[in-house]
Image: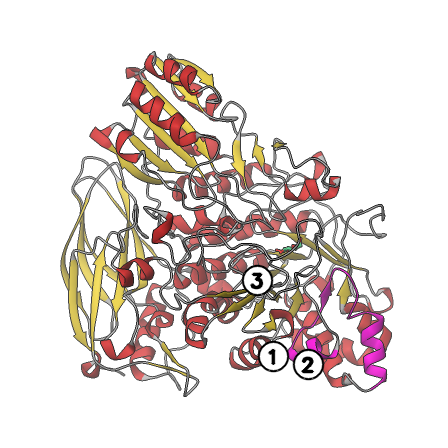
Amino acid sequence: MEPAGQAPKRCAGAAPAFLRVAGCLAAFAAIVIAVHANEPGPSGNPDPDARADALVRAMTLDEKIHLLHGTLGFAYEGRPAPDGARGGAGFVPPLVRLGIPALQLNDGPLGVRNIDGGTEGRATALPSSQALAASFNSELAYESGRIMGREARARAYNVLLAGGANVERDAWNGRNFEYLGEDPILAGRLVAAQITGIQSEGVVSTVKHLVANTQETDRHWVDMSVDERSLREIDLLPFEIAVKESGVGSVMCAYNKVNGIYACENAHLLNDILKSEWGFKGWVMSDWGATHSTAQAVDAGLDQEFWEERYFAGALKAAVEKGEVSKERIDDMVRRILRSLAAIGALDRAETLQPVDAAAGLAVAQRVAESGIVLLENRSGLLPFRAEDLKKIAVIGRRADIGVLSGGGSSRVESIGGVTLDDTPPGMPAELAMFASTGWHHSSPLKAIATMAASATVEFTSGVDADAAARLAASADVAIVFAWQSREEGKDLRTLSLPAGQDGLIRKVAAANPRTVVVLQTGGSVLTPWAPQVGALLAAWYPGNRGAEAIANILFGRVNPSGRLPISFPRAQADLPRPHPAESLADPMKPGVAPSRQPVVRLSEGLAVGYRWYDAQKKTPAYEFGYGLSFTTFAYANLAVNPDLSVAFDLANTGDRAGLEVAQLYVEFPPSAAEPSKRLAGWVRVELAPGERRRVRIAADPYALRVWNTSASEWRHPAGRYRMHVGASSRKLPLVQEVDFRDVQVD
Ligand code: BGC
């Protein structure tokens, strides 16, 4: 049994009584990650504050300013890469006199990006963050972080721009695949574990993008308008958990405005909440080109500018000399950067290039993919296939002969084994095309399936000709359609339907052969109107460097699926809080130029995000948050809610195969709390043999038991009757019991 991996802050002290109890009990369930979270990295400095202070005292103003801005680390628009840069997203040259190393930054969060890495620089392409979230597995998040950290370090990078912590509010968002789904506790716990893994390898991790960066349309200018309570309970919560539980070294502020003020010069977000309330000791770096001022941004809490050096280079020095920016604040900015570097040991070593253990990376990538694939439909037990029953298999779908899809943008990794890029719009500059392109990691579904079914004939067709695909399907025992949906940074989706006529293709193939399995490779939810016609349906997300092998293992039953949806799949676009994607107000002929009117997006759904929205609106999704089938079945019984807020219940494997259930706990607050619906408060991953029954416990996550009171500006724990729900998804909750928190026994 694997617990959820909560790392509680404290068991006594100022916290309200029942929260304290919950915190103590979570400690019970805490796994190894909690231990890592509080330790410096392997070569980490035990007193990073003293180390940073000493260096700050020794620095001249020029040396300090030097550290507060950086450029791209690769050649761009005819400019060569800076001397000594490793080719990553960012670079700050070393301060040799003081022994301060260069800052070599590279992108995550799906592996080490390596834009200029060439063949030698190839790295493990991890599955998308949605796949990781679907595993509900903190230990795996930690392992994936360790792989990224190790591979970054091996290539002499000391700062990784990972992990992505924006809560999914909009199914349209082109970057949803970089984030961990629609629930802030799930996202927060997993991102904290991942960051702990990255930093344990001696690399600073950067949680991004603070905050409400929930769409790509007009991302440089858009004003995201959101009420304070929703901001605290939803959008900021994963960042809060990351800061408090992982000791993350750096935070990247977002491009967009939040309630009228750019995130990177928003004092409420950066000074008041992040640095004062949460006690963040690291530094805030701007997203690339997200700095808009000098003194205002500095005073608001921004510590470092990337990548244009417009406001924090010469202009910052001038502002100090004119007295517009205080020397104390400059020292604070520098100290924060040096402290984070000292904490992971980067001030005490010369980075050297090391060989990468590709096998270790690929093994973790495959585990994430296998744990994150969600079985959505399985009619008449079509899956798993028995290889010996199959004489002919039809494999259908774009590039299913060569690879699996990856999203585009700063997170796309130059994967081990190579990647085939999709075409980009004609006329796009080469560097931009490199950046934007989606691509196909060379993990071939066709080959992986042929390996599994060695005695069958396995035939491939791309599906461009739907009739030819249907003919092939009709001639085969089973047909497997690899469907795709591309997403990329900088661009939102225009439709939630599968593109390029794939709905029609699937219908034709399924009509020709009802033993059709659809494997979705998507960066988020899609409409699945044909689902009742297909035999089985898998959500494989962007499955990464060993995606095809993972998919084949599930299709043929070597792995029993245990992934659960970290997002809701809608039935129709009309059911979404924003039924249409945002329209850009910028002039398409003038890229980079601010639109003449201020784009504003009102996040009027507020707290009602994801499954909370469907609950509050009494709408039924196509597939709900937390849902996922197994090749076996599970039964829940005998719920007991303890006065300390933990729950215990019996979980049984009622099928004839070993399987892993993700049992989930949801808390429904008393009406006085004015929450739109129940919330996920914990989960546990339980592996059971056929027929096995076990008593299982889940401790409610302390972060899930708070309600933000905006007028008092504090967290509260409303008294009253709570309903604790336990079950297999946000909508299949067979066990429920009420508990009165006033009666809770504490201490
Ligand atoms: C993205 C960041 C990324 C940065 C550096 C920006 O466009 O929003 O997520 O880390 O580029 O590549």
Task: Give the extent of the magenta segment.
Answer: 295-322
- Relative to 4, residue 557 above or below: above
Q: Earlier in the sequence, mark 1 or mark 2?
A: 1
Identity of the amino acid at label 3?
A: His
Q: How many marks?
A: 3
Q: What numbered label is drawn on residue 299?
A: 2
Q: Position of residue 407 (x, y in %)?
A: 55, 42
Label 1 CB sits under 8 Å from any ligand 1 atom: no
Circle 2 SS class: helix
Magenta stretch: includes residue 305: yes
Image quarter of residue 697: bottom left
Image quarter of residue 527: top left
Q: CA distance from mark 3 to mark 2?
A: 20 Å
Residue at horizontal 65 percent and vertical 36 percent from the top: 424
- Relative to 674, residue 348 above or below: above
Q: Position of residue 338 (x, y in %)?
A: 71, 70
Label 3 CB sits under 8 Å from any ligand 1 atom: yes
Q: CA distance from mark 1 to mark 2?
A: 7 Å
Give the labeled residue for mark 3: 209
Left or right: 648 with respect to 684?
left
Residue at horizontal 47 percent and vertical 53 percent from the top: 141
Give the labeled residue for mark 1: 267
- Relative to 509, residue 137 above or below: below
Q: Position of residue 591 (x, y in %)?
A: 70, 52
Identity of the amino acid at label 2?
A: Asp
Q: CA distance from mark 3 to mark 1?
A: 16 Å
Circle 1 SS class: helix
Identity of the amino acid at label 1?
A: Ala
1 and 2 marks in contact (CB < 8 Å): yes
Q: Earlier in the sequence, mark 3 or mark 2?
A: 3
